[in-house]
Image (tube, coloured by chain):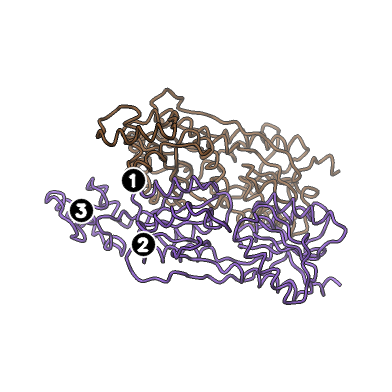
Chain colours: A brown, B purple
């Protein structure tokens, strides 16, 4: 049997969810005729209000706004799937706001979500990933967070202490680099994303740190900047391959650029992993759906999204919650990397 | 200089967008002090109301709800990108509602969007793609469409005359099949999606029709049903390859399954296109980002999304618009298909 939700009761009674909540929680007066109609429906459907419904105050709507920069990059839909799954049982529904990486659009959505009275906001990408974010863009988020519970995912804003759920991206880049070195690689290139984004900066720093710790030099031309797209990965890999002096392994800032790099190598007749190893970051579904399957750093996007909802839910319920929650990434070894020993 | 929008004026004046609209259009009384505050800001910022803002009645909010079944399948984000781009100039903002293919979730979102008073709804996937949709699910959409402008994309509901924007999917499947036959292929398999979805049924029918028209037989085992995922494409391709009697070409219901089929072939050491040709459908960015690049039927997802917004906008503005708008697909020949003559 279909589980009856607070939305069904509200719909059937032709009232808002907030009204049903008021009746359930006795938090505000409701017209007698409305109250008895709702009580009759609750009885009829044997409605069991879930944790959220019981906790809803008259101000709460059961909706959450999710702001993200690019639905066409699978990383974000995957995190969003984790958000969806975790929130289902809690009875939340979502508005997904795609900003196409446009900061003005982010401002607009922050505004609109406030107007639409969502209970909370989860913010991914865009300005919260900038190495240097303008003060007015920071202020806007802080102002919003003062009014509505707000959680940043994989990002930060300078000088603030907002609630955050992040992947330990530095750690992930360290693990990947060390894995390549342990496999016998000495000359490794890094295909990076935009150089003004923290996700690029953190990973490049970790890559260089581990190389140095192992006594290996990284020349300037071994770190190539572009964006986070497949086309960028292909372009930068072509640049790497056009040199006679080729690295034996390439570490890519994300799986999208790794897929592009893989294509460039195959097209040039360079075997992966036989001639060159490629390692990605994220573990989007595509990573294991292509041939050869990508070795990559798994971000646990599902857990990242789900955890963001748990933190936000606690904020909405005014429960105690840590300012920072860190999810540890892990290496997934597949087919696109090879030990140098196996080659020689 | 940043272009000032109706949202900025509303925010600065600390009133709703509807109030600014009322002042702009003189459609309803607004308190004198509020009116003069708004007029001062309009003057100060030299605000030029765009077409949408000028047309906004007191009921309108400038927001549109987009309901879709799966943000992790790139087809939908691509259509959504088209929606976004077209709507920018019109000043609309969007709520994207991901239903994870769950019909109850669709009902919930239809409800919530109504509560949140969006100006219009664009509906993709889910129940509108079912070969047999339950009457109560149909009724719900019709009821919503009676109250709020609503446009279906690539779908239909039996016994209704809702506004629709669709790709001519049958035509696309016909073109692809004829192309394979013209290239000398006689034994062609079809990797299909879920068998209860119209997108599968339409394409399978068109495939069989063209095969028959060319005097070619399609045995039952040459049409394989699964779902629309890469994993399904890989699984079904493995089944095809496990038979000694192999087709020379495989037509896939979408690019996702084609990517999976390609992986299965490469993993089995079957050359694509040398040993077997593969053709997809949609032309998602991934189609040209892998090696070999996929031959596919381009859906013009961008135009599909943009056209849906144009139709919806006309409905919101109460202008005349056709019930049905058809976008024609086109074949994009890349590297995953080969003429049989070239092989023999």
Tag 1, which chain?
A
In the displayed orientation, state which residue is furthest to the left.
B32
Which badge, 3 or 2, comes first in the chain's sequence? 3
Which residue sits at x=55%, y=35%? A304
To which residue does mark 1 refer?
A: A111
The C terminus of chain B: image quadrant: bottom right
Secondary structure at numbered mark 2: helix
The reply to the same-chain question for discs 3 and 1 is: no
Judge from the rendering whether residue B22 lies leftward or rightward of residue B169; answer left or right.
left
To which residue does mark 2 refer?
A: B90
Which numbered marker is on residue B41? 3
The N terminus of chain B: image quadrant: bottom left
**Distance in Å between CA atoms under marks 3 and 2:** 21 Å
Which percent across, then down, holds residue A259? 67, 51
Whether tag 3 and tag 1 are in contact, CB under 8 A, the answer is no
**Distance in Å between CA atoms under marks 3 and 1:** 18 Å
Whether tag 1 and tag 2 are in contact, CB under 8 A, the answer is no
Secondary structure at numbered mark 1: helix
Q: What is the crowding at mark 3: few (fewer than 14 residues within 10 Å), some, or many (at least 20)?
A: some
Which residue sits at x=36%, y=62%? B90
Judge from the rendering whether residue B131 lies leftward or rightward of residue A28; answer left or right.
right
Tag 2, which chain?
B
Secondary structure at numbered mark 3: helix
């Amino acid at each position: 049997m279909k589980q009856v939700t607070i939305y069904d009761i509200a719909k059937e009674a032709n009232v808002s969810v907030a009204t049903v909540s008021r009746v359930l929680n006795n938090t505000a007066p409701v017209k007698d005729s409305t109250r008895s109609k709702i009580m009759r429906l609750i009885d009829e459907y044997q409605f069991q209000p879930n944790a959220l419904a019981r906790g809803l105050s008259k101000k709460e709507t059961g909706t959450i706004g999710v702001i993200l920069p690019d639905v066409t990059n699978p990383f974000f839909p995957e995190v969003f799937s984790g958000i969806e799954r975790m929130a289902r049982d809690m009875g939340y529904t979502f508005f997904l706001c795609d900003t196409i990486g446009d900061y003005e659009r982010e401002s607009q959505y922050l505004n609109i979500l406030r107007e639409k009275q969502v209970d909370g906001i989860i913010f991914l990408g865009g300005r919260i990933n900038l190495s240097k974010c303008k003060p007015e863009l920071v202020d806007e988020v802080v102002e919003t967070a003062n009014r509505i519970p707000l959680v940043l995912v994989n990002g930060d804003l300078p000088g603030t202490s907002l609630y955050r759920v992040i992947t330990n991206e530095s750690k992930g880049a360290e693990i990947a680099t060390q894995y390549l070195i342990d496999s016998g690689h000495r000359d490794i290139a890094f295909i990076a994303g935009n150089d003004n984004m923290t996700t690029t900066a953190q990973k490049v720093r970790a890559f260089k740190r581990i190389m140095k710790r192992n006594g290996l030099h990284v020349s300037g031309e071994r770190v190539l900047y572009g964006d986070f797209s497949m086309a960028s990965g292909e372009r930068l890999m072509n640049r790497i391959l056009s040199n006679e002096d080729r690295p034996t392994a390439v570490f890519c800032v994300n799986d999208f650029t790794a897929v592009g790099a893989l294509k460039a190598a195959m097209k040039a007749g360079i075997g992966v992993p036989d001639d060159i190893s490629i390692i990605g970051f994220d573990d989007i579904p595509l990573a294991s759906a292509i041939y050869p399957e990508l070795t990559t750093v798994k971000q646990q996007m599902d857990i990242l999204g789900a955890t963001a909802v748990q933190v936000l839910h606690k904020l909405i319920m005014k429960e105690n919650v840590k300012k920072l929650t860190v999810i540890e990434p892990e290496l997934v070894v597949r087919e696109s990397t090879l030990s140098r020993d196996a080659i020689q």
